[in-house]
Image (cartoon, rainbow, N blue to C red):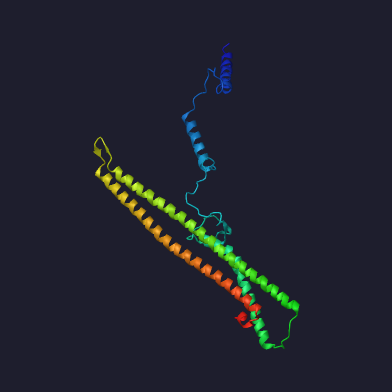
Amino acid sequence: MLCKWPMLLSLLTIFIFFSNFTHGDGGTDSHFQSPPLSDEFRKGRNEVFSRLYAEGPNIVEPPVQSSSLILAAERTYRKDPLNGFKRYNGGWNINDRHYWASVAYTAVPFFITALIWFVIFGLCLLFICVCSRCCKREPYGYSAMAYALSLIFLALFTIAAIIGCVILYTGQEKFHSSTLNTMDYVVHQANVTADTLMNVSVYLAAAKQLAVDRILIPANVQTDIDYVQTKITSSASTLSTKTADNKDDIEHLIESVRTALIVLSVAMLALTFLGFVFSMFGMQVFVYM
């Protein structure tokens, strides 16, 4: 009988262990609880979880969002040659070299096309001048078809030049209005920031007069408040002054660019009209000029 007691105790222990797994969590009538964890086991478990949290991928915290203001992000989404031809997403920022690099890369095909056109035009003009000087021929008349084609091409080129002048004029108007709207928005945000700083300065001035049970703020704290208030007021004044000065400079530059583009479009339109008139009346000297 004594030999059976160890076996009975083992069976009782196994029964208690499995009853904890089957009824310990969900059942409400369980009379048994799992044995308490030792301090060494808890310490080791905490170290494992800490290491996994430190070394594993961060899937809990959301990505940090930048609080900086990005202007015209969609319009300036261009390839940046200085950054491996990746897309530039910094917005309108004239102080960033990546912004200017993306602008230059976008305009490079057009500048190359214009340069090639001017080179070919110059070479053709030089070739015609050399041929006219070296190989003089007797003047002869042209057929009616040649005159008709010349008139048709002259009219087409004149219409194309007029359309280009109109596009240039409307484009500079859009550029002018868009730039002014962007500048007004930036100036408004700067003024709002300056007003907020001035309000904080007023709140600090009022905070110095606070008293609890007729006990005022200590003198050293009031001195610190005065120092911070002076710094905030100076920053607000500097921000307002610099904003006004930069606004005047930018407006002057924008107006200068607008005037230059308008003069250029009007000059191109006038030259196109005069060239058409001179060609129609056979004034070859003025056409060559």
The location of residue 215, given as percent across then percent down, is: 24, 38
The location of residue 187, given as percent across then percent down, is: 43, 55
The location of residue 96, given as percent across then percent down, is: 49, 60
Depth check: give the residue in front, 199 or 261.
261
Quadrant for the N terminus in the image: top right
Quadrant for the C terminus in the image: bottom right
Q: Residue at x 40, y 53 (%)?
A: 191
Is residue 68 positioned above or below 39 on the image? below
Left or right of 255? Residue 27 is right
Left or right of 201? Residue 28 is right
Q: Residue furthest front?
A: 281
Is residue 3 in sight in this rendering?
no
Depth check: give the residue in front, 11 or 67.
67
Marker count (numbered)? 0
Left or right of 126? Residue 263 is left
Is residue 129 positioned above or below 155 on the image? below
The location of residue 83, given as percent across then percent down, is: 55, 59
Depth check: give the residue in front, 13 or 109.
109
Is residue 106 positioned above or below 201 on the image? below
